[in-house]
Amino acid sequence: MLMVRVVLALGVFGLTQAVGASGVLAQAAPAPSAATPAQGTPDLPRRRPEEAQGDPMVAFDVNKNGKLELAEVKSAAAARYDELNPDLDDSMDEREAAPVLQGEAFREADTNKDGNINKAEYLAYVERMFERANPDQDGSLDRAELDTEAGRALMRLLR
């Protein structure tokens, strides 16, 4: 519903801009049709190639210090949540979450047991997974920690 309101508001704004001071409707680019997939939908993900595969340090180490801090991981996780939930309704069911969470992992992330995961639950789950991957509790993950079972499980939540 929110998406419809935004599209309608943008359409009215665009028409106002196209008519302009001359009062003549200018030629405008065609509006996206319902058949055109939106950016970030599960059908056509718009992820940078290095995020989808390859070196997580290149993809997620924003400050380029050779380690992943919790803030960097949670930022990447928030972006991934939005990709998995393109309608931004703050409720992701198991079908939507399937690329990163299934079965017992989904149930563990769903702390209020309503059958959906909201962004806060997803980020809390990511934080728990970060802590599991960080046995020295130094607040950052190095390459060795990412190369553990817990580190790889965490990275699956971000890709």
Image (tube, helix red, strand yellow):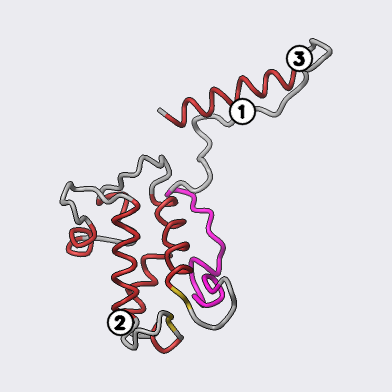
Q: What residue lies at 41% left-to-right and 89% top-to-bottom?
A: 144
In this figure, which residue is indicated by the disc labeled 1?
Answer: 31
The magenta segment: 42-61
Label 2 residue SS: helix
| Image x and y of residue 84, in percent | 39, 51
Q: Is residue 19 above or below residue 108?
A: above
**In the shown orientation, is residue 97 left or right of residue 35?**
left
Label 3 residue SS: loop
Q: Is residue 86 above or below residue 111?
A: above
Count residues near mark 3 (Cα–Cα under 10 Å), then give few for <14, some for 14-19, many for 20+.
few
The amino acid pointed to by label 1 is Ala
Q: CA distance from mark 3 to mark 2?
A: 60 Å
Q: What residue lies at 54% left-to-right and 29% top-to-bottom?
A: 33
Q: What residue lies at 59% left-to-right and 78% top-to-bottom?
A: 64
In this figure, which residue is indicated by the disc labeled 2?
Answer: 149
Q: What residue lies at 34% left-to-right and 74% top-to-bottom?
A: 130
The amino acid pointed to by label 2 is Glu
Mark closest to the chain's N terminus, 3 or 1: 3
| Image x and y of residue 25, in percent | 76, 14
In this figure, which residue is indicated by the disc labeled 3?
Answer: 25
Q: Which mark is residue 47?
A: none
Mark closest to the chain's N terminus, 2 or 1: 1
The amino acid pointed to by label 3 is Leu
Count residues near mark 2 (Cα–Cα under 10 Å), then give few for <14, some for 14-19, many for 20+.
few
Q: Nearer the viewer, mark 3 or mark 1?
A: 3
Residue 115 belongs to the span the image colors magenta: no
